[in-house]
Image: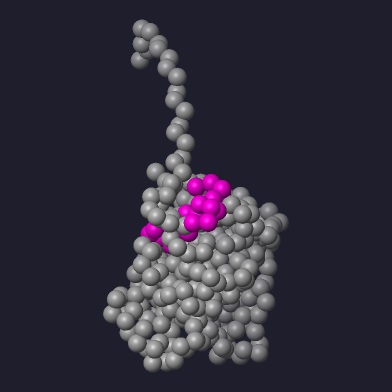
Amino acid sequence: MKRMMPVLTAALLLAGCTVPTATPDSAMESGTEPASEVVTTPTPEPAPTATPVPEEPGLDYDEIRMIVCEGSEAAELREGYYTMSRDGLWGLMRADGTEVLPCEALRPVAVCGAMRKWHWDVYRNWDELDALSAKMTAAGDGALCAAHGGSVHSFYYDLDSPGRDTTSVDLSALRYLQGGTPAWAVPMEEGCWDYFGDILPVYSAHEDPEGGPEMGWPGPMVEETRDDGQTVKWWYICRDGTALYPADLDKAGWFFDEALAPVETGGNWAYLNRSGELATEAIYDPICTTAFAKADEEPVSGAPLQNGYAVVRRGNGWGLLDENGVEVIPCEKDGVAWEGTTLLVKEGDEWYHTELPA
């Protein structure tokens, strides 16, 4: 699930959202040959789902985590790499286990900013860092971030958009909230659709008067009510002008080009399908922190699917979910990591590379 940022050439096009539903204003407020002998044979029981077993020597690290990209309202993960720790310090490795940066950082490695450079929190002089960054670039592993400025990637539906059609979903009211400090909201561009996908998590809001029309900052979330009386907080807007209105989402993650998106409801995480229905129960705990979080900071979101699978956790048990919402690895492992290409499973105190379940 490799992507380029929306300011660059688009890499992905998703299937459109085709399920028409209520609209933000008016529709939310309104209601809507016989054989000579029959031989019966028993039906065999289906084979149980295979559980991965270690196939390679364990990786000599205390902890391995998926890498969070900076700025998304819910997690976006970096494919092809993991961040790993030893004795409380963090480094960077390719998914195959090749070390890229040693375990010297004070916090897990993250991906910084629009250019997708590595943020490795170490104390070294600039010449050393520049030389290391050049070496990484030559090896095809990207570059280090020379400085850090915050950025965000989220969307909201501007209820104050001039000329907005209040009888239907009006794509002209969709705003891309980008930038650092301060952030600013801009009208939606095609490059954003191409990067983030054809179904986007949004919330409704009026413009914040303090931001002025040139900034278009959103004010507080404006909650709506569905025809069945349930509350709509976060919802999904589609490139074809339709929308999905799941009930009572406290957070909403990305679909990108995947079949499911992680959503939080009732204090737990679940997975939503492209019809706007829950494909799983809300039984999962968050596993992803924000980018640049300290190692001991609490997770804040569920993991998005990466090439058809997502890591899930219930309590201390880790598992792997497929695009149908099925735990192909039940939440019984000591740890699971999947960044989209290479599966790692923790057994006891050791991490191993292993194969996806058949």
Asked which quadrant contains residue 164, the reply is bottom right
Q: Position of residue 170 (x, y in %)?
A: 53, 71
Work out whether residue 288 or residue 237 is closer to the camera in this orientation and state it.
288
Asked which quadrant contains residue 294, the reply is bottom right
Q: Is residue 150 left or right of residue 136?
A: right
Q: Position of residue 74 (x, y in %)?
A: 55, 68
Work out whether residue 203 or residue 128 is closer to the camera in this orientation and state it.
128
Q: Position of residue 205 (x, y in %)?
A: 63, 75
Give above or below for 188 relative to 168. Answer: below
Residue at left offset 29%, top offset 76%: 139
Regarding residue 204, the answer to whether it shows in the image is yes
Give above or below for 244 relative to 139. Answer: above
The N terminus: image quadrant: bottom left
Work out whether residue 243 or residue 258 is closer to the camera in this orientation and state it.
258
Point out the residue furthest to the top here.
36
Q: Is residue 36 magenta?
A: no
| Helix, strand or loop for the magenta stretch, by majority | strand
Residue at left offset 38%, top offset 70%: 99
Q: Position of residue 337 (x, y in %)?
A: 48, 59
Point out the residue furthest to the left here.
138
Residue at left offset 41%, top offset 80%: 117
Asked which quadrant contains residue 169, the reply is bottom right
Give above or below for 184 relative to 348. Answer: below
The C terminus: image quadrant: top left
Magenta residues span: 329-350
Regarding residue 190, the answer to whether it shows in the image is no
Residue at left offset 59%, top offset 52%: 317
Number of marks in picture: 0
- What's the colour scheme? one colour
